[in-house]
Amino acid sequence: MKKKIIYIVIGLVLVAAVVFRLITNKETTQNRVYQYDKTTPISVQVDTLKLEFLNAENSYSGSFEPNKETKISAEVQGNISTLLVDVGSQVNAGQALIQLDNTLLKLQLQSVEIQVEGLETDVKRYTQLANADAIQGVQLEKTQLALKLAIVQKATLLEQINKTTIKAPFNGIVTAKMTEEGAFAAPGMPLLQITDITKLKFTINLPEQKINQFTVGQSTQLSVDAFPEILLKGKVSMIGSKANMGNSFPAQFLVGNTPDLKIKSGMSGNVRVLSENEKKHLVISSSSIVGTNIRPQVYKITQGKALLSDITLSERIGNKVVIEKGLAEGDVIVTNGFINLYDGANVTIKN
């Protein structure tokens, strides 16, 4: 019985020792853990809001197109006897590009020239005879009409022969070839494509609220994605009068290419324009905003406390936002020092 009592006493002592140890460890742990004092002011940086003008640079992307580009076809039909250019050839206005076979036309021309020569002789002879009343005047008139008809036929054949030489309509580069020597050419059948990139068209699409940033004739500066070091001068040549499928309006700029024609058709680029707004706005740094995109908030300093305030944003410009509602000129908001900051916290302002 005494042994049983001794075991019970030893067990109680051990339990008491464990409990004492746990209590001691808890106190030690609590002493080591930092206990934040909510009454201690939090040091923050602030900004006093004031109204300011907006001078925002907007950038719009677009693509370059040739100022002039056309597919060349023959005006008369015939076999291609000589192809004088290839893809990549630089051509000048009036330069011969394709020669069609005109052998038959030249033979017809020779025949008509013989007719003209004979009729001219007849007209001279009949004129002398008519003056001497040796023949009737009607015979002379018929010969004169036949001569006029032959001259018209000669001019027609000369024009047809001239059209068998297909020439470049303007200076440019051959960018496509759709035929070869020996092929048959007919009116309306594309044979070559000529592209002029000495001047370029640059086209962007504007949302309707931004269309007033451009006017026809306005000078602008453009950059090229492939050559960021190159800045081009452009001029607004057209602003669309009808929205496209994306409910935006096309705006087109006429741009001079570099002397070595570095800018190619199809390249992308950007046009930048400074938007000047005559009305003053409240503008804050976007880093001052807490909360969510659905419910943006800022900490507003009121009587030494940081109070969460709901705001409404008008637009974003780079790393800044324009305030529509929720703040007023002269309000002080927290811009830095958000660690441990909470709604209603006491704050001190860092200089």
Image (cartoon, rainbow, N blue to C red):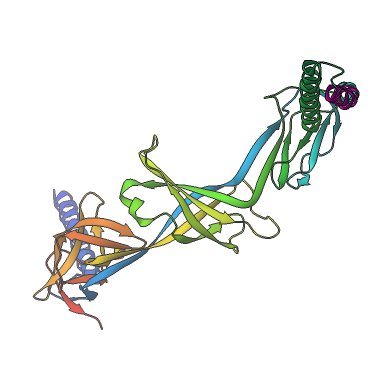
Q: Quadrant of residue 190?
A: top right
Front residue of 325/56: it is 56
Is 320 left, or right, of 138 in this rendering?
left
The number of discs equals 0
On the rendered structure, is 21 left or right of 89? Answer: left
* Residue sitting at the far left: 303
The image shows residue 210 at horizontal and vertical percentages of 34, 52
**Left-right relation of 277 to 67:** left
Majority secondary structure in the magenta region: helix
Q: Which residues are magenta?
A: 115-132
The residue under the point 12% across, 74% down is: 39
Q: Nearer the viewer, residue 286 or 75?
A: 75
Vertical comparison of 42 with 256: above or below: below
Tell me where residue 63 appears, x and y as whole percent: 54, 47
The location of residue 160, given as percent across then percent down, is 78, 27
Image coords of residue 113 (percent x, y): 88, 26
Please indicate, yes or no, whether residue 184 appears anywhere in the rendered image. no
The quadrant of the rendering that contains the C terminus is: bottom left
Q: Quadrant of residue 144?
A: top right
